[in-house]
Amino acid sequence: MRQLKDQDTARKFKGARWALLKNPGDLNDDQTMTLRKLKRKGGDLWRAYKLKEALREVFAGDLSDEEVGELLDRFCSMAQRSRLKPFVKVAQTIRKRRDGILAAIRLGINNASHEGLNRRVRLIINRAYGFHSANAALGLIMLTLGPIEHVLPHEHHRSSDP
C-alpha cells in the first residue's frame, strides 16, 4: 500500500491487513469494525475475503465427504464468477485435483508432520554448519530426532483393532 501513488487508497485500507488475515472468531472490536467498513465498500477486496473464508470452511475438518464436495464445487463456481485471477487459478487447480483433495480429507492425511520434520532438520543442519563431514550432521539429526516413524491415519486405526 505504501507504494501506491494514490495515498487515499492506502489510507482507506489502513489497518485492514490483520483483520483480513485472522479467523473471524479471533477478531477484536477494531478489526471487526474494519471488516464492516470493507463490506460496505464492497469491491475486489471484499470478494477476495469472502472467497478466502469460503475455502477455509471447506477445510474446517468437521464435514462429511459429500458436504466437502459440495462446498468445493460451490467455491469453484464462486471463484470463476469473481473474475479475480488468483482465485480463478485456484478454482482450476481444485477442479483438476478434486479427487485427491477429497481423499486426503476423508483419510485425514496432510503433510503437516513432514513439514515440521523438515523444518527441524533444517535447523539442525544450520547448527551443524562447519562440521567436517555430512555424517556428523546426519548423526546430530538422528541423535536429536531419534528414530522417525510416520504412521498414516488409516494405518493407526488398523493397529488399534483387536
Image: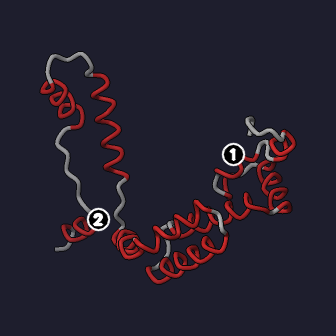
- Quadrant (top left/top right/bottom left/bottom right) for the C terminus: bottom left
Label 2 element class: helix
Q: Amino acid at mark 2?
A: Pro
Q: Is residue 158 left or right of residue 20?
A: left
For label 2, the residue is 153
Disc sitting over residue 18 in the figure: 1
Image coords of residue 148 (percent x, y): 20, 45
Residue name at image x 83 percent, y 41 percent: 6
> Relative to 74, does residue 129 appear above or below in the rendering?
above
Question: On the picture, is 103 further left or further right than 144?
Answer: right
CA separation in Å, label 2 and label 1: 34 Å
Tell me where residue 86 appears, x and y as whole percent: 58, 59
Residue type (three-letter) at the residue carrying disc 1: Trp
Image coloring type: secondary structure
Q: Earlier in the sequence, mark 2 or mark 1?
A: 1
Residue in the picture at 85% in, 60% down? 41
Q: Quadrant of the N terminus?
A: top right
Q: Is residue 130 left or right of residue 93?
A: left
Tags 2 and 1 touching, CB below 8 Å: no
Check the image and name the residue furthest to the front: 5
User: In the drawing, what numbered circle is on residue 116?
Assistant: none
Q: Quadrant of residue 150?
A: bottom left
Q: Position of residue 70 (x, y in %)?
A: 52, 82
At label 2, counting other C-alpha atoms closer than 10 Å, the crowd grade (few under 14, some 14-19, many 20 or more) is few
Of residue 119 and residue 24, the one placed in the foreground of this image is 119
In the displayed structure, would residue 89 be above or below residue 145?
below
Q: Nearer the viewer, residue 62 or 120?
A: 120
Residue 134 is situated, as x and y percent measured from the top left of the image, at 15, 26
Q: Helix, strand or loop at disc 1?
A: helix
Location of residue 36 by image quarter: bottom right
Task: Choose top left, top right, bottom left or bottom right for residue 106.
Answer: bottom left
